[in-house]
Amino acid sequence: MEEKKIDVKSIIGFVLIFGILIFMFYQNQPTPEELEAQKAKQEQVEAQNKAAEVQKEIPAAEPAINMQDSTSVAGYKNAMGAFGFNTPSEATTVLENDLVVLKISNKGGQIVEAKMKEFVTYDSIPVYLVKDGNATFDITFKTSDNRSLNTKDLYFEPTMTNNGDIQVLSMKAKVSPTQYLEYRYEMKPNDYLVDFMVRSQGLNGIINPSGGINLEWKLKGIRHSKSIQYENRYTRLTYNHEDGKISKLSESSDDEETETDVKWLSYRQHFFSSILATKTPFESAILKSVNLVEEESKTAGYTKEYSSVVPMELQGGELSYNMDWYYGPTDVKVLSQYKELGLEDSIPFGWGIFGWINKYIFTPAYTFLSSFLPFGIAIVVMTILVRLLMSPVTYKSYLSQAKMKVLKPEITELNEKYKDNAMKKQQETMKLYGKAGVSPMSGCLPALVQLPIFYALFMFFPTSFALRQKSFLWADDLSSYDTIAQLPFSIPFYGDHVSLFPILASVAIFFYMMMTTGQNMPTQPGMPNMKFIIYLSPLMMLFFFNSYASGLSLYYFVSNLITIFIMLAIKKFIIDEDKIHAQIQENKKKPKKESKFQRKMREMMEQAEAQKKNK
């Protein structure tokens, strides 16, 4: 009866604390008018600060050539030598479909603006992947008269045509009407992928092959999220090389690698990617990533600076490379359309089996649930399904804890009896476990089984594009942290805001650990103090998850609640501790056959004990 009273009190306390917490936060929340006023004021200040910061970070543009100044034009033509054929023009040409807008400049023939038409940033500004000089695409080469030229400095002549519903833009840096270097863009309707060709005609003998030809692609990732540190954590240079191997540069520090047989390069900016893919793999590439974020900032405009240098080869004295540009979301539904390029592999599903679970189980499951349920409810339903599937593991774990609880008095007796002889105490404890048919490790194994699930979900929620800017209850973006209070200062390792979902998840895990570790696990000498872990784990979750995806905190909150109720159900209706105790006593009476490993361990411990006595 006493045990039941304790359980009832725990449940009542658990429910009361949650009720009080939720009541407090809702009572103290500002009115809708106050929220709107605060939000408008904050957005105005942040927009001004961000604009000022971005403006400071934009590299100084080279002075434009004055078209009315014949001396300036003549100077350009003289500097470019044979490639000074085209008349300089600063104009741009637009390629546009229902998804993306690309602006291609006559200068350099390169993309100088890439805008997403269906997406906005956290502060409602259209998502740009290329803008204000944050990216350059350049081919460096030498000419037969020993000039070192960069295509970013050359002026290309645009020609826009249509091939059915495909927009075709030809940009030519001419030496003569029939001799030129061409960039050719082909944009299809309702498609993020743009066919891109680099080829030359009649330049055999004009480009010096011994001078080396290099493609250089650089990009500074533009900030899109309210937490630049959080966004930067999932901003990485990813690449496909060596017959399908996927590798990444560091997400937290500067990094550089030289790779071979490169098929595509992805400059990922958390939920959006700029990708250059090639039909013919690059023989080698020097890849570099520079981290631009040292601390949390409301005004910093860029996350990382990427660069790739790829040597190019002439075929019969001419250049000919068929490639593709992708400017769009890092969304499995979109990238899976390009299976022949393997762009889906640029999504950070996770490593090994964890990534497999994420890619083939959680992502399809959530996609299906969110197709007919609100996004937050879909998380709750998916959590319930996961916990129900894992309930046999929960049962095994609780059964092991129940057995350990039954043995606790005998363990305590052994600890007291052999308190001055650690070796003998360990030997007798293991003998007791063996006679009772109990393994102290059996409680750990279920936790190990759940680790792949834990890690897969840890990667799923922050990187799932389906959750981006989807609201639930007080959280306005399930892929980012929720905010119920803005602090006037920043707490180290916590932040300048208070998130409610991590608080609820921390309280739930505290009660879960009190029900399991706190009551049932005997403290062994040399083992960590269980009470310390009970308090430390929820505190760590509270601090770590405060700036993490609210969808993940929601999952852990619901998951721990369900686990608590499953364990209560197991305890009340499935497991009978009196029967377990009786079974253990029966096990003790039966002769126990030792395995070779157990016999070897026992003999080693006996030898160690004998040596100790002889000394």
Image (cartoon, rainbow, N blue to C red):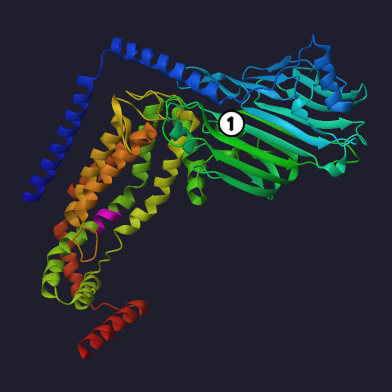
Vertical position of residue 33 compared to residue 26: above or below = above
Q: Nearer the viewer, residue 613 or 202?
A: 202
- The reply to whether the magenta stretch includes residue 480 is no
Q: Please rate how many residues cluster around mark 1, counting C-alpha atoms within 10 Å: few if below 14, some from 14 to 19, many from 20.
A: many
The answer to whether 497 appears left or right of 212 in the picture is left
Q: Position of residue 408 (x, y in %)?
A: 15, 63
Name the image quarter holding the C terminus.
bottom left
Instruction: Determine which quarter of the picture holds residue 213.
Output: top right
Query: For the view shown, which residue lies furthest in the front direction?
Result: 71
> Magenta: predominant secondary structure element?
helix
Q: Position of residue 104 (x, y in %)?
A: 71, 20
Amino acid, disc 1: Lys
Depth check: give the residue in front, 293 or 27.
293
- Identify which residue is drawn at 25% across, 66% down: 438
Viewer can see residue 236: no
Res 492 seen here: yes
Provide residue 116's location: percent of width, then percent of height: 58, 21
Q: Is residue 593 left or right of residue 324?
A: left
Quarter occupied by residue 149:
top right
From what the image shows, is residue 158 above or below residue 259? above
Residue 132 on image: x %, y %: 61, 21
The residue labelled by disc 1 is 220
Residue occupying the point 23% across, 21% down:
26
Left or right of 270: which side holds 226?
A: left
**Residue at (48, 35) in percent of width and height:** 293
Which residue is at the far bottom?
Answer: 614
Q: Is residue 42 above or below residue 572?
A: above
Identify the residue shown where x is 34% and y is 53%: 447
Q: Which residues are magenta?
A: 396-400
User: Who is closer to the viewer here, 516 or 229?
Assistant: 229
